[in-house]
Structure formats: structure tokens, C-alpha cells
Amino acid sequence: MINKAQPDHAAPFAVILGTNEIASAIAVYLHRQSYSVVLSHAPAPPVSRRKMSFHDALYSDVAALGDVGARRVDSGLEVLAGHGSGQPVMVTELGLLDLFVLKPFDILVDARLNGGEVEPALHGLAKLSIGIGPGFHAGCNCDIAIETHPDSLGFILQEGATVADAAPPPLLGGKGRERFGYAPHGGLWHTAVEIGTLIFKDFPIGRLGATAVTAPFDGYLRGVVRDGQHVAAGDELFEIDPRGRNACWSGMDDRARLIASAVTKAIRLKRANIVAGRVAPMHIVQ
């Protein structure tokens, strides 16, 4: 049965920016701790690991991670009606300013993972603001920052900036960056291939404008940007899992769990007024 949280109209209110797999894992962890959670969609970067996230709830598709489900909400009244009621995680296109006027945020998490291209400013917008990945400086533009760099993944910073440089993705079935397909230019993306499909080298995964985008090797489609999305040059369009029968394209992976766990630990650390902390390292699959 999905959504075991019991009705509690005094439930703390958490807003997470982003609908990707990291934002969604954080939503699951907070929901299980009786938070009322809203995911606010960010148009960029596009989401490819859609079966590992709540992203498709925006399109009224079924979206669930473990025992936690999600549903789309379109208005502030729907957000308030769903607050603390034990309903699924709420996913919306309402932006930060739209949500800010509804009620005070107990927790605000920026999990958009934009690589630091946009300077976020979360400090003072919630009782506790947490920034995930590059572009965040604890004590300046957020209260706490969480590292996403593989060398320090899950470290909790209450002072200082996260690592700015992006690292190559860890190997998955012997493949690193080459398992991703990136947009050669901006345009409208079209695809009819479903996540989880077995594909072969040079198989046409989709078209970006007039440009055909093909698979670089055999494997299962682990992620793909939804059909009809506008993308920018360099955006990730798809990911292939080369591990054959061991391929996985749904649920939470270790990386998402570790970052989500770090967020919940950061909340506990803040409550306990502990100066610094870190999450124990674990094997990561990105």
C-alpha cells in the first residue's frame, strides 16, 4: 500500500526544487519522516531518469518510489489541501515565489543540480535551507550544503562551498560518460522509445529537430528525456545501461539514497546544534 503516513495537519512543510531522481529520493526520505512534501518542477536541466523519480507525475502518469507515491497539484489551494493529510508527495509547476506565499517553509532544499550555472539564494527563505551540489556556500546562500562530488559524496557542510568542478561519472558496466547521449544543439526533442527498452548500437533513440540521435552501444535504456521537451545544447538526452540482465532503470540508486540520507542527517544535526558532520561512505552507482 502506497503512502503510510498518517494524517497530521501540524506536519512540517518541506519544499524541494527539482523533480529529478535526487530531489525525488529526498522527498521519499522526508515523507517517511511525516513531512508534507512539495516538489517544484524546474525546466532545466531536463530529467532523463524518469523511472527513478516523481517527474512523470507532472503528466498525470503513475509515479511511485517504494511505498511513496506522487500526484500533480496545480494551485496553492491544492497544496494547502494536501498539506499534512497523509496524501502522496505533491509535484507542481508552481515556482518558489508561488509556494512561498502559502505558508512558512520548515525545510527548503534546492536539488535542481544545475551545476552551479545559476547562483541560488536560499538563505533566510526557510527555517532550514539546504543546497545540493555545486553552486552552494553554507552560511552564505544556504544554511547547509551537501556534496555531490564522488570524492566527497554526502558530506555535510555548515561552512564553506561545495566542490565546483564536475567529475566524470563513475563506471556502470564498464561505461562512463559514453553511456550518456547529449544534445548536439538546442531544439525540440522527440522520442517514442520507452525507458527499459533493449536497444542496439546505432538504434535511433530520437530526433532533435532534424538531427537523428542514435545509441552508441547495446544496452537497456536507463533514462530518456520525455518526448516533446525543449532542450539546450549539451543537455543530457538519454542514458544506456550496458549490464544486460543486471540493468536497472527504476527505484532509487545508492547515490540518491546517500544524498537523501545526508539531508535527513543534516536536519538532525541542525536540530542538535552540532557544528559539522558527514555520512559514512558507501559504494556508489550513478
Image (tube, grey):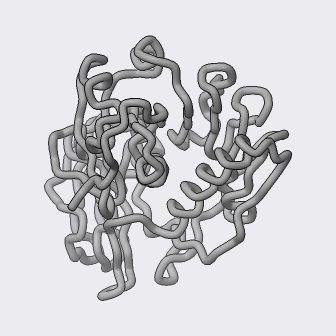
Q: Kindly give the residue lying farthest to the top in the view shown.
A: 101
Is 44 placed left or right of 228 in the picture?
A: right
Quarter of the image that includes the N terminus = bottom left
Q: Quadrant of residue 58?
A: top left
Question: What residue appears at the point 58 percent right and 58 percent down from the top-left corner?
Answer: 261
Q: Quadrant of residue 128?
A: top right
Question: What residue appears at the point 16 percent right and 47 percent down from the top-left corner?
Answer: 61
Is 188 placed left or right of 241 in the picture?
A: left
Depth check: 193 or 65 in front? Answer: 65
Is 92 placed left or right of 156 in the picture?
A: left
Q: Does 15 appear above or below 195?
A: above
Task: State the image coordinates of residue 139 (x, y, percent, origin top left).
Answer: 79, 31
Is 142 placed left or right of 219 in the picture?
A: right
Instruction: Evaluate whether residue 224 shows in this view.
Output: no
Instruction: Evaluate whether residue 70 shows in this view.
Output: yes
Question: What residue appears at the point 24 percent right and 46 percent down from the top-left corner?
Answer: 56
Q: Does 70 appear above or below 220?
A: above
Task: State the image coordinates of residue 192 (x, y, percent, origin top left).
Answer: 14, 55
Task: State the image coordinates of residue 46 (x, y, percent, origin top left).
Answer: 38, 42
Q: Does 207 appear above or below 101?
A: below
Q: Does 276 appear above or below 203?
A: above
Task: State the image coordinates of residue 167 (x, y, percent, origin top left).
Answer: 67, 59
Question: What residue appears at the point 40 percent right and 58 percent down from the top-left corner?
Answer: 181
| Number of dots carrying numbers | 0
Depth check: 48 or 8 in front? Answer: 8
Q: Quadrant of residue 116?
A: top right
